[in-house]
Amino acid sequence: MIEVKKIINKGRGIIATEDIPEGTLIEVAPVEIFPFEPEQTLAEKGVFKYYFVPPLEYSKSHNVNRYLVFGLASLSNHAEKPNASVEWVENEVGVWAHLIAQKDIKEGEEVTLFYTNIDEYADAQKFL
């Protein structure tokens, strides 16, 4: 349903390999949660350059846990009006990232997300 491709001026990104209807569960990926540590970022730890934050919590405070997604959703590029979103699901096995189409996505179209913490990216201008 999706694949990684090189996107001009963005680097890697996710492209739909078929038409994806609104509401479709595109991917389920495991998540590791890293507690907020004010003196160190995940990038400084060398764990991963980009991470997710829970939007509702982040809107109240930037001192929130960071979510590392082990799936293709982690390669989705930012868009002000994205066509997908991530739903965080916790069960007895752990936390999961569900990548869900928020509108119809055509074959060949890039799958995008809104980066809640775009203000923390040193190279944010590349994404805007």
Image (cartoon, grey):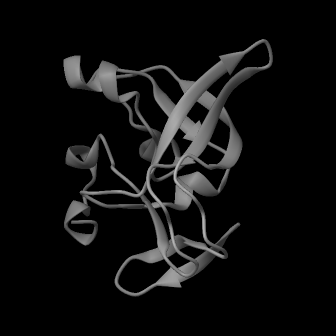
Above/below status of 49 relative to 110 = above
27, 66: nearer the viewer: 27
Residue located 24% across and 57% down the image: 80
In this picture, residue 24 sits left or right of residue 12: right
Q: Is residue 47 visible?
A: no
Foreground residue, 52 or 18? Answer: 18
Nearest the camera: 84 or 117? 84
Q: Tell me which residue sits at (55%, 53%) in the image.
A: 74
Instruction: Please indicate whether residue 71 sits to the left or right of residue 74 in the image.
Output: right
Relative image position of residue 79 (x, y in whole percent)? 30, 61
The image quadrant that residue 62 belongs to is: top left
Q: Which quadrant, please, contains the N terminus?
A: bottom right
Judge from the rendering whether residue 97 lies leftward or rightward of residue 41; answer left or right: right
Task: Give the side of residue 91 with respect to residue 116, left or right.
Answer: right
Vertical placement of residue 57 versus 9, above or below: above
Q: Residue at x 44, y 55 (%)?
A: 103
| Figure quadrant of residue 65 | top left
The answer, for residue 107, to whether it is visible in the render is yes
Q: Which residue is farthest bottom?
A: 8
